Amino acid sequence: MKFGVVIFPGSNCDMDMIYVLRNIMEQEVVELWHKDTDLQNVDAIVLPGGFSYGDYLRSGAIARYSPIMEKVIEFAHHGGFVFGVCNGFQILCESGLLPGALLHNENQKFICKNVYIIPDNTTNAITHKLDKQKPLKIPIAHGEGRYYASEETLQQMRVNGQILFRYCNQHGEITSEANPNGSIENIAGVCNQKKNVFGMMPHPERASDDELGNTDGYAIFESILSHLIHHK
């Protein structure tokens, strides 16, 4: 599989993502600069975390207008696989490729710590190989991670199985105490209606290497890869 990792001015998790895809998952990876307009025939696009354009205005708001994003939007509209993590998730919401928005954390502070998330369903590319009963320990690092969508939108998302993950405790219980940022319904990740565009706030690439003592994120990449290979 050929993955394209989009790099914006201010991206800082791009190399972590490239390392996991290239060295751990053993896939071909190309770097796509924000001014590029050639996607180099990639099979999948990943928008990594960071602070694109310094998060001025609103996280992801300026990056959404980068030349590369026109091509990413086109790619997604044609059914291409797109995955955004943290700032990448914010950019996908700003682009209208994902429903809802990411607001300032409830405590108005930047939060960086390990959290637990649990799959809401296993009917999509990101979660289909995961155990619905098993919570995953994945780090978060964000100041604007509070997911919000209108009740009408949430209702549609529930029906369509568009909620990927919810924040939970280590026992898999979805509680308000386990919600790190005040996200509505403890939502940690979502996908679009067609289930080809995905976004999540936690960083699976920071939990995919044995050296880090936590490989819970590896299962997410394994799920993605198996889906892409099966659907190629």
Image: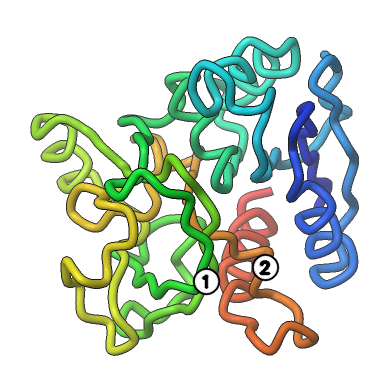
Kindly indicate the quadrant of the structure image that contains residue 121: bottom left
Q: Nearer the viewer, residue 185 or 40?
A: 185
Disc 2 residue type?
A: Arg
Give the residue at x 55% y 26%: 60
Q: Position of residue 132 (x, y in %)?
A: 33, 77
- The structure's colour scheme is rainbow
Task: Provide the residue designation for mark 2.
Answer: 206
Task: Provide the residue designation for mark 1.
Answer: 138
Give the residue at x 38% y 81%: 135
Q: How many marks?
A: 2
Callouts 2 and 1 close, C-beta under 8 Å: yes
Whether residue 74 is situated above or below residue 176 in the rendered picture? above
> Is 99 placed left or right of 66 in the picture?
left
Whether residue 158 is situated above or below residue 131 in the rendered picture? above
Q: Position of residue 150 (x, y in %)?
A: 15, 30
Give the residue at x 68% y 44%: 48
Q: Position of residue 158 (x, y in %)?
A: 17, 48
> Is 195 placed left or right of 77 in the picture?
left
Q: Nearer the viewer, residue 158 or 128?
A: 158
Give the residue at x 59% y 17%: 64
Q: Secondary structure at mark 2?
A: helix
- At label 1, counting other C-alpha atoms closer than 10 Å, the crowd grade (few under 14, some 14-19, many 20 or more) is many
Q: Earlier in the sequence, mark 2 or mark 1?
A: 1
Q: Position of residue 111 (x, y in %)?
A: 47, 57
Disc 1 residue type?
A: Ile
Whether residue 108 is situated above or below residue 230 in the rendered picture? above
Q: Secondary structure at mark 1?
A: strand
Q: Nearer the viewer, residue 205 or 181?
A: 181
- At label 2, counting other C-alpha atoms closer than 10 Å, the crowd grade (few under 14, some 14-19, many 20 or more) is many
Disc 2 to disc 1, how far (Cα)?
7 Å
